Amino acid sequence: MSYRSTFAEGERAAFQALEMEKTEDWDDKRSRMRKRFVDINYGDRNLYPDIYCDNKISNTKYNVINFLPKNLWEQFSRFMNKYFLLIAILQLWPLITPVNPASTWGPLILIFAVSASKEAWDDYNRYKLDKQANERDVWVVKKGNKTRIKAQDIHVGDIVWLREDDEVPCDLVLLGSSDSQGFCFVETAAIDGEIDLKTRVVPPPCIGLPLDLLHKIKGVIECPLPDKDIRRFDANLRLLPPFIDTDYCPLTIDHTLLQSCYLRNTEWACGVAVYTGNETKLGMSKGLPAPKLTAVDGMIDKLTGAIFIFQLVVVLILGIAGDAWKSAEADKIWYVKHSKKAPWFDFFVIPLRFELLCSIMIPISIKVSLDFVKALYAKFIDWDLQMYDEKTDTPTVATNTAISEDLGQVEYILTDKTGTLTENVMIFKRCCIKGVCYGNSTGDALTDSALKRGLTEKNPDIVKFLTVMAVCNTVVPILSSNGAVSYKAQSQDEEALVNAAAQLRVVLLSKRGATSEVKLFGEIKEYEVLDLLEFTSDRKRMSVVIRDSDTRKLMLLSKGADEAIFPVLCSDQPVRAVADAVETYSKLGLRTMCFAWRELKEDEYTKWSFKFKDASSSVIEREWKMAEVCQLMEANLELLGVTAIEDKLQEGVPDTIETLRKAGINFWMLTGDKHATAVQIALSCNFVLPEPAGQLLHVQGSTQQEIAVSLERVLCTMQISSTEPKDVAFVIDGWALEIALKHHYEAFTELATLCRTAICCRVTPSQKAQLVELVKSWEFRTLAIGDGGNDVRMIQEAHVGVGISGREGLQAARASDFSIGKFRFLKRLILVHGRYSYNRTAFLSQYSIYKSLLICFIQIFIPVMVNVLDKDLSESTVLQHPQILYYCQGGRLLNPSTFAGWFGKSLFHATIVFLVTIHVYANEKSEIEELSIVALSGCIWLQAFVIALETNSFTVLQHIAIWGNLLAFYVVNFIVSMVPWGGMYTVMFRICTQPSYWLTMLLITFLGMGPVLALKYFRFIYRPSAINILQQLERSCLTPSSNLSSLESNLKQTDKDLQSPNLVQADVGNVYEPLLGDSASGSKRILGPSSVEFLPSTPQKMLSNYSRSKIQ
């Protein structure tokens, strides 16, 4: 019977079998087995109803019905909004409100409306994008014919056709492509940020099927339930007769086209929809990350809560006193109306009145002001051309506009190595083949005369080594029209190795299906790739089983890390020479890769292949089962040699790290590289100082007991060498780290707290995130920086996440709070933008509360316009003296001490205004409106002079904001006084013509600002902080770097209480010095050495007490 004639009969029989299987309760079975079964191209939807969702995607947060209640619920989840709503509701009770309710309801509604409008606008934009994606035209197969439908009408099981440059509308399993070998290329930048094209391949049973049969193809795909893992797809394909037998064909992520990818360099491709709509891998991974709370926001919340408690105490005291007076004295005063039969709620009237009067203590303007200035801070970062990378055309972008002030309080930086500290441009440098090293003399193995001579003589060891380099990989060769071969690879290391082999005359020409074509010294050889044992982070090696087309011999080719290859070698293998080469290359900072092989027997491979097929067909725990089967094959290998690849450091990395370390920031390097390579890179980057200034401690071992002994030895070493202050660092690998965190947490924590630098090698992405979480648990502010998809979890876990737009794509940059082009920009991001943002936010938040304690509601433009442009020191001074970042890290500008200063200042000024106004106008026959205007004028004058005194650098805009506000106060009040029906008619004209008014203003200003100015002058002259001294140098027209030696003794005296940046004295506790300005001792922590010269601390102090005093 012919191929075509059996199609209808096979189709009928297959569907009868499927219908019998479907008599089971498939919903329960799928839930129990964590699978879904996709029927390919099952035709009439009325006969086979769809049990999965359609392809309509929705990324909106709201709809028309739930927008208002849902948005209000989110806004009222914040304490301050609840508080303002309570006050607004109380003001609706005429019996207790002293002001017009509109004074609170107006701003409250405005703030909520602005926030809701922003949310609505953002959601509407998401809706438009969704609609555009849902309504675009796509081609699908309907009843054997291609039909154009809307993307939202695609269902699971439909066959979708794509043309070149089309966007993939849902997750597809590839069934066919225009390439005769079943290859196609996709751009995945939309889902993982990687800009290199990825290769996808048609499953073997479908390769070569004609177009008419692709229209009629039937079968079943067994796959997992929808998940968000874009790098994994463990499924099976079973095509129904007449296409193939009923055996399952395993599917991986290489057989899929994921939603939002683009088809490139391929004329057409088709695939069956397996996940649609919001159940695609991209749809499952979408969602807003949890909002990050900055240290400043946390402190403001605590201070606001303290004010609220203080307010309740005041209200309680005044309310009880008021009720007592009312009960005892109200009846005796004839002009006070007092009902003899008071209602039941009469007791609460006076306390609630006082509550409304005291509600101004928590300003409604603080939220608006902070949101506005934070948006400006983020724009300053975006506009900074000094952080623009011209080479890659990459600007710095603040993707999170709410946390820029946290940059100024960073205490720990946890960084990736490859692509973050290095260029991620791999260059083949050296190799060792069978114990013979090449490239040691010239520094480049490709130009080594001995290697060239071996190639000319066709040395069998060299030939075998280069063959493994050329064949054992996932590189895709691309042949251009002029005959030149280029390579596409997901790994920069693999591309470097294949290019190096090609330069040594072993050229990978093509990969056609399961056949790899290699040009070996001008002779074409073909190798049939039977099985691919893929690389995983656990196995740390990959292998291929190949058959030589000429000799028909079976071979296993393997490559991987030395610790993954050495354990699977033959017991009689001489590995000393290669191991020494690995150690030598690692000390040079080169990346190493070992190569091995062995010849296979037919019966051995046949038995193993059945096990491999079963494991690869498993949908549940496939990776674990595959690892077990791979281990059976990867044994008794013959070691061929090792390669060494160079990855150069980025420009400016050592200087950036050195400067930030001077600022008291500790560094942890988290890398997947081997121990020696990581240590060498750390030395090159100034992570660790060389002996004798630095000391590197090694935590080693493979068992719980060995790790315990190693940790104890390292801690004892620190005690013995405590008489010599050193830059101490420790290095640990991933396995030892896992044991230490699980069984020796306290000892590891002690070591990590005492060392300024840590090098963690051979760590996995999950361990990176775990280490960030560990440092956060010690209540340090953390910053994580990386460039690849494996760094995303670490970046999202840290208080501040920074992504580098590099060769590994944009996935890290998209998941970060700030994206930069190069690591060196981190110095300016932290020292300039982070420090300025923290200083300005600390002042603005406390000033907002200060002015609210004086008056009810003042325009928010004054603090914003003045503060957002203020700089206490120039940028050049900040970069020359990074130690001043201690003032930000220690929270010295915003803490209970500084807040007490502002609180006391507001209370003092309020007292001055009240007493002066009452006494000056005691004998005047003034109306209450006139007296109120005089008091309000005094508040406005004091605020203008306070902000002028606290401003460090004046610009034209700042002068306009400060003095223009004072002028605007009089202009507005004169206009209001001209309105006949207003309560203020002619009031301003009357009081401004009285000399006593102007004398009152001068007296209030003198009495209010005199003590503040005297205290600030005393601090600046007799107890200057390091910032004050640098300001003096700037104002005396000296460069901050000149004449510093003459001020060294003064600086040491100023900061004599400062210690090592890793240390906080526990006996200082939570004692704070009230501040009206900068103070060296009024800080969250006792931190850091002198701001110009570090005062070394001894390890004895570090060991005696490493606990940290935090603001509770």
Image (tube, rainbow, N blue to C red):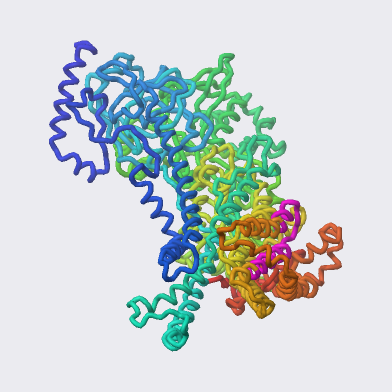
Residue 216 versus residue 711 in the image, above or below: above
**Magenta stretch: dominant SS?**
helix
Q: Is residue 676 above or below residue 469?
A: below
Q: Is 955 covered by the magenta stretch?
A: yes
1023 or 687: which is nearer to us?
A: 1023
Q: Where is residue 187 shown, x and y percent of the image?
A: 48, 29
Res 507 quadrant in image: top right
Relative to 712, say whether 772 is above or below: above
Q: Is residue 757 visible?
A: no
| Nearer-the-camera pick, 8 or 899 | 899
Residue at left offset 68%, top offset 73%:
1081
The mark tally for this picture is: 0
- Residue 567 located within the stretch drawn in magenta: no
The residue drawn where x is 40% and y is 53% is 72
Residue 33 visible: yes
Q: Is residue 216 above or below residue 278?
A: above
Instruction: Give percent across and percent down for residue 699.
Output: 55, 61
Is residue 490 or residue 557 the one in the foreground? 490
| Rendered-image quadrant of the N terminus | top left
Q: Position of residue 1050 (x, y in %)?
A: 81, 72
Residue situated in front as seen by the camera: 247 or 260:
260
Region of the chain picked out in magenta, as a range: 934-963
Residue 69 in the figure: left or right of residue 997: left
Residue 798 x, y percent position in the rendering = 52, 55
Q: Which residue occupies 44% across, 17% down?
A: 267
